[in-house]
Amino acid sequence: MKKHLNTLYVTTQNAYLHKEGQSVVVNVEKEARLRIPVHTLDGIVCFGAVSMSPFLMHHCAENHVAVSFLSEYGKFLARIQGPVSGNVLLRREQYRVADIPERAADIARHILIGKIANARAVLRRAMRDHGDNRELKTAECRTTQYLRRLESPMLIEELRGNEGEAAASYFSAFPQLVTVKSEAFQFSGRNRRPPTDPVNAMLSFAYTLLVHDCRSALEGVGLDPCVGFLHSDRPGRPSLALDLMEEFRAFLADRVVLSLINRRQIQAKDFNDSAGGAVTMSDSARRTLLGAWQKRKQEEITHPYLEEKCKIGLLPHLQAQLLVRYLRGDLEAYPPFIWR
Amino acid sequence: MFSDSDLLPLSALQHFIYCPRQCALIHLEQQWKENRFTAEGRAQHDRVDRPEHETRDGIRYEYATLLRSLKLGLIGKADVIEFHADKVYPVEHKRGRPKPTHCDWVQLCAQALCLEEMLDVEIPEGAIFYGQPRRRQPVEFTPELRSETVQTAKALHALMVSGKTPPAVYEKKKCDACSLYEICMPQAHRPVASYLANALSQS
């Protein structure tokens, strides 16, 4: 298996990253705070006022280390892209398949099967752990119905409609997944741009981390992260990365957020309200989430399709590879990640 | 005759003989992962891979010479070419021991064919230096080996023109030693339909 490497998250404001030999050095106030060999990294994510020398950018690009710049609050700003890796013929095949409605819809359908099955698995786990109440049961039943519908081919518009409904029933039961009875963590539906409550702020932040990971996984196998099957093309939107992350939203992002809340590792005081109603995470809350994210990615799991052990952090890469195998014609369909 | 822009790396012949899919993954899809074997091979190569020459005992040794054949459509490098008074003698360095397939021979023969085309000489023989054991094995460029080399070059070009990576065929010995195992996934061909049915039926 590909070695799963670490992502370096830099949240300290005014930090400056540069290259010394084969290492990344993080300077804060002209003092080296961290030194880490580049070959142990597969990504660097900089939050807010963090800068980087062009030589380090070049070195990262050459060594396939994905570098992203996000705002202090996790909004995507820019990323460094090195020479395009992989194969132009594969990317052409990706574009061709994306242009054939039936084939694009077929991939989208399999991705959604993964997404909804994993959301259902999160609901089922909650039912097992905290007893099943009506909301959970209803949502579980509905997701099962949506999954059944996905057994036969659908047009892309129908798929998107189905997805919307499935997401709505999942999120309607989401408050039941929060076991901490605190005013702050009441959840009344998913919102973003900006998130207006702590749970949404955390979800948005976790999804941003997931997009970064999915995007670099796709680039790593030579696919174009901007040409998707479920998400349509829109300038600047990483549609394929958004497609790929659907399978991991509930399984990876939602569960990290929920366990931080339920284990009281993050509390109401960790959030700031702004005048416009937007809620942001404090610096320490972001660090806590990044730590939990990194830890979750190091956990091992048996890949359901490949039946091989791998770290959770490697899953986006493996799914990207399976997508390549399908596009290349090695597999008759795309096998999504389905958590069991 | 091939044009300059259609030349393929000589080393691809070896990959092609080992496994056409491996060859396609490396040269078509540009996927390459280093493992212990390739790293050691590279380390050994780095020692001989220096662009210079020297003369000892009346033999001039040229290192890392660029090679090209427009007839075969190949470009590459020769580790060592010995220029004797009466003959030109290519020597290729390999990390391991002699392999059961012809792939090293074909690669060396291709070098000889390039040299013949470039220098307008005849090269009847060359040698492969194996790291394990540290021994030199002479290789005669017979009509059969020459013909195999030409055929392999043709098949390689056909593969690259097709742009299609051949399907995986799992062969334990070969696949387990291949540095591209994880990228190739030669054992992952479970039907997706039954995987889905199975994954969804479990509650």
Image: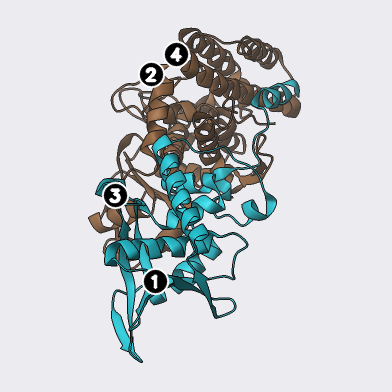
- Left of A196 or right of it: where is B196? right
| Residue that numbered label 4 is attached to | A101
Residue type at mark 4 is Pro
Of marks 3 and 4, the one in the foreground: 4
- Residue at the image position 42 percent from the left and 28 percent from the top: A94
Please tell me which of labels 2 and 4 falls first in the chain: 4
Pointer 4 with pointer 1, Cβ within 8 A: no
Q: Mark 2 touching mark 4, by CB under 8 A?
A: no
- Label 1: few (<14), some or many (≥20) within 10 Å? many
* C-alpha separation, residue under disc 2 versus residue under disc 1: 51 Å
- Identify residue for label 2: A232
Mark nearer the N terminus (3 vs 4): 3
The residue that label 3 is drawn on is A50
Q: Relative to residue B193, is residue A263 depicted above or below? A: below
Looking at the rendered structure, whether the residues under marks 2 and 4 are on a common chain is answered as yes
State the brown chain: A
Separation of residues labelled 2 and 4 (CA atoms): 11 Å
Element class at badge 2: loop
Residue drawn at (29%, 60%), measured in percent from left and top? Answer: A18
Q: Nearer the viewer, mark 2 or mark 1?
A: 1
Question: As shown in the figure, which amino acid type bears the numbered disc 3?
Answer: Val
Q: Is residue B45 above or below residue B4?
A: below
Is residue A10 at all visible to an observer of this figure? Answer: no
